[in-house]
Image: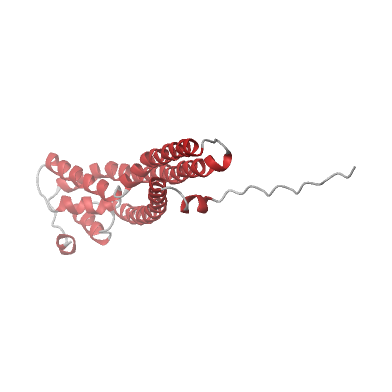
Amino acid sequence: MIDTIEPAAAPIRLDPVSLVLHSSGPVFVVVWLLVAAAVMVWIIAFLKALQIGRLSRAERRFEQEAKHALSADALFAAASRYADAPGAVVVLELGKRAGSPKLLDSVAKRALVDQEQRAGSLMASLSTIAAAAPFVGLFGTVYGIMDAFLRIGQAKSASLPVVAPAIGEALIATAIGLAAAIPAVVAYNALNKRIDALLSAIEAASEGWVALVSEVPATLPKSGAQG
């Protein structure tokens, strides 16, 4: 008796690109929305890292000079030289107003809020993607599973060739949703920590700036007044 050797089964390969390109309408839209969100996360994270790095460097240079300022005029001169630093912007705002320490403190807090909004721009987009992407992917998964059940009903069979395409495209939607959400969460937490550290340092120093400006009336340099 001669034994017959069966040919080896072809290895099963996961082809996410094929699953995405051949997915059904709603899942196709969901997947490409998530792909766009994932790309946006990396773009925003890169731009924010550059911005926060630039602001932090400018702020360090300004504070190195501002801590040696013994008068309001010297403080305004330092702020004019580093006008891009968030702390310098606060000092220049103080120079535009004259009044009691309480009024100047209010001006400083208003300027701090403006700088917080400046440093926190686009952070809401990262937070939204981090929160919404898994649920958008889940919607695609639910629709794909529903499509799989419809195919079973139409074919009157639950064989793998019938349900595998629908289940595959359903799961790929969840995978891409997580691929968008996880970097968004990591980037948001890392960048938000750097923003908080920057703003906390400015807030701590602003009390001294207010006290220095309120002691002796000072004139704001022309370059700072025009900016």
**Residue 169 in the image, given as x and y percentages of width and height:** 48, 45
Q: Is residue 48 above or below residue 105?
A: below
Taking the image as shown, residue 81 lies to the left or right of residue 147, namely left
Taking the image as shown, residue 94 lies to the left or right of residue 182, namely left
Q: Is residue 87 above or below residue 81?
A: above
Asked if one can make out residue 69 in the rendered structure from this viewpoint, the answer is no
The answer to which image quadrant residue 54 occupies is bottom left
Q: Residue at x 34, y 45 (%)?
A: 195
Quadrant in which the C terminus is drawn: bottom left
Residue sitting nearer the eye, 78 or 182? 182
**Residue 69 in the image, given as x and y percentages of width and height:** 26, 53
Taking the image as shown, residue 122 lies to the left or right of residue 11, namely left
Query: According to the image, what is the colour scheme of the structure?
Result: secondary structure
**Residue 205 in the image, given as x and y percentages of width and height:** 28, 44
Asked if one can make out residue 224 in the rendered structure from this viewpoint, the answer is yes
Q: Residue furthest right?
A: 1
Residue sitting nearer the eye, 84 or 224? 84
Q: Residue at x 45, y 44 (%)?
A: 173
**Residue 85 in the image, given as x and y percentages of width and height:** 29, 55
Quadrant in which the N terminus is drawn: top right
Taking the image as shown, residue 88 lies to the left or right of residue 170, namely left
Residue sitting nearer the eye, 151 or 171? 151
Q: How many marks?
A: 0
Q: Residue at x 15, y 53 (%)?
A: 95
Q: Residue at x 27, y 58 (%)?
A: 84
